[in-house]
Image: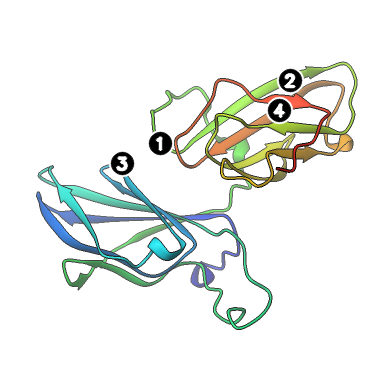
Amino acid sequence: MEALNQGREYIYYRSQIGPARPIDDFRLISTMDRAHIFINNKLQQIQYDLEIGQKESLVLEAPNNELGILVENMGRVNYSVKMNHQHKGIKDGVLINGAFQSEWEMYSLLMDNLEKVNFSKDYIVGQPSFSRFLVEMDETGDTFIDLTGWGKGFVPVNGFNIGRYWKKGLQKRLYIPAPILKVGTNELIVFESDGEVADFVTLTDIPDLG
């Protein structure tokens, strides 16, 4: 990410990896922090923390295959011995059957232009997605959003990113300060990275810190 002058959010890597064959040694080398691995746009696995760098197996079945890797920057450590080793994204490469893969396309996803998202497109089950909710309000106040049924992602409200959610917790509800809301129509967008979506979100005045 640093090489692309990107300090936050996500980056997507894409590369063509050839014909049908088994891959017995697939590894992400020096990658932080969390990676979704796709073959031909189908999610194969999610690696996080100590899982990253382990040897994995994949099977390529199509005549031509595309590898996609969505890497999330989950924040930087600002203390102790790891403070000087906080690069994000894929630093040292992707190993496929003992050789480093080359010829990558890289896309910085700062998520700061969501007004360009086309919400009329079909939802693809199990894929990362954007969902849009329009909420009519007669009055405003400090509010909390409950994302039970969702997996992992973040929530902008009226263009303001109120934070990230993760079904693991600990925090169960995100805080929406009253000044972000307005009388009339309010827009809530949910970016879900893990393909776990619900048909609704819940707004309440009761916090749940886990």
Kindly report the distance in space between the C-alpha atoms of the residues bearing marks 3 and 2: 32 Å
Q: Which mark is residue 41?
A: 3
Reading the image, the residue beneath label 2 is: 135
Amino acid residing under circle 4: Glu
Q: Position of residue 196 (x, y in %)?
A: 47, 33
Reading the image, the residue beneath label 4 is 187
Q: Say which residue appears at 42% left-offset and 65% top-offset.
A: 50
What residue is pinned by disc 1?
127
Label of residue 185 in the image = none
**Residue 185 falls left or right of residue 148:** right
Tell me the kind of residue under disc 2. Val
Q: Are marks 1 and 4 in contact (CB under 8 Å)?
A: no
The answer to whether the residues at label 3 and label 2 have Cβ atoms under 8 Å apart is no
Query: Is label 2 in contact with label 4 (beta carbons under 8 Å)?
Result: yes
Separation of marks 3 and 4 at Cα, in angstroms: 29 Å
| Mark 4: few/some/many CA within 10 Å (<14, 14-19, 20+) | some
Which of the marked residues, 1 or 2, is nearer the chain's N terminus? Answer: 1
Element on which disc 4 rests = strand
Q: Say which label, 3 or 4, has the lower sequence index.
A: 3
Labels 1, 4: front one: 1
